[in-house]
Amino acid sequence: MVTDVKKLRRFNDLLSKHSQRRHIIVLDPNGKYKNIEQPDEEVEYDKNEWKIPESISTWINELEKKSIFSTEEKILLLYQKLCKDYTYDDNLISYIRKSDDDTFLLPDWYGRDTDEKWEENRGQHNRRVCFELSRYLVTSLNELLKNKEGFHTCILWDKGLTHYYVALTCGEYSITLDTDDFTNIKDLTRLKTGLTAEGIKIWEDENGKFQKALEQFNKKRSEYSIDRISDDIKSQEFEPEEESEDIMFLKNAIKVLIEKYDIDSQGIFEYMKEIVDIKHGPEKRKKVWKRIEGEDEKATRYIRCLTVNLDGKEYIIDGDKGILRPFDAKEFDKKDAEFFRFNNPNIGKDTIEHYDGR
């Protein structure tokens, strides 16, 4: 598969006008390209090798043989496969630092410029960040489309937002695919419960070919998690408890997310944040950090949780333990505190140096 960089530049021009942000085109260091002599300010080769786990490669080979699916349907099934197999590593967020209104900083070694030890540690779990997921996705697309002409792919790097995602352009359409678009509940989380895919954007599609496939994929799926979870709660029986209806709804929502969908801690954070915001308003909740102890400091990480103020009482939604319980702000001040205020200056790279990916 030979990728035409000229076509990628044209797509990047179009995308930059729509998004009003210029992206860097990131290429496979071992890929085959034409219309490029050497990297420049707009195009660079990735720091890491592009590869995918053998299990994903085997799955793609089986998918490729299934003639009942169109190319567009196969792209969507592949996207869904990765979203279901991996979760977002929100420990990354504890390292992000805001430089100014439009620029954020992140250590390159957190998933972008890695080594063998990092890769070995990542193999122990399924938490990934956008750098890793974008490599999986673009390499998987290249594998899926290797016998087809006219498809061109790359990773797009929004350097100011420290974010990677994938671009695909061909003669019929141009799309971007973002498994962890942070403006919504991430598709990494959404697709696990059968919500609509919102991280795929169509920028060109004159005949509506990809649009039709995406609409069919999203057909009969809920757009909002509160609708899906409300239906799930109604269809199940829960033990009655002597608490308010609002508190019981949140407790039962957490049970559904864990017991029916096996949602991880960061997924619980995203779903419950949206549910609280819709039912009660964002002023009713606050983000907090929870420290997850590792074998040593390099393996210690942080996840996001929520405190919620309802019925005049404070509660915490602890995604790690999968519970909602009463919470006292004095817990922040304990010597061995697990929870920290979200703007705590001790969280991040100042105290967790060179997290090793575990």
Image (cartoon, rainbow, N blue to C red):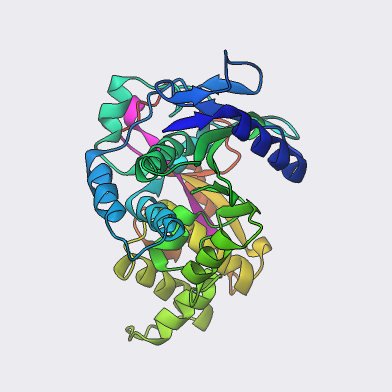
Q: Is residue 257 above or below residue 199?
A: below
Q: Quadrant of the N terminus?
A: top left
Residue at image location 65% in from the left, 31% down from the top: 9
Magenta-span inclusion, residue 245 = no
Q: Quadrant of the C terminus?
A: top left
Q: Residue furthest front?
A: 149
Q: Is residue 7 above or below residue 36?
A: below
Residue stretch rendered in magenta on the structure: 291-307
Residue at image location 50% in from the left, 74% down from the top: 219
Q: Residue furthest top?
A: 38
The x, y position of residue 89, in whole percent, is: 42, 42
Asked where in the image residue 354 lies, by quadrant, the reply is top left
Asked where in the image residue 17 lies, by quadrant, the reply is top right
The x, y position of residue 114, in whole percent, is: 39, 22
The x, y position of residue 343, in whole percent, is: 61, 39
Q: Is residue 42 above or below residue 323?
A: above
Magenta-span inclusion, residue 302 = yes
Q: Is residue 160 above or below residue 207?
A: above
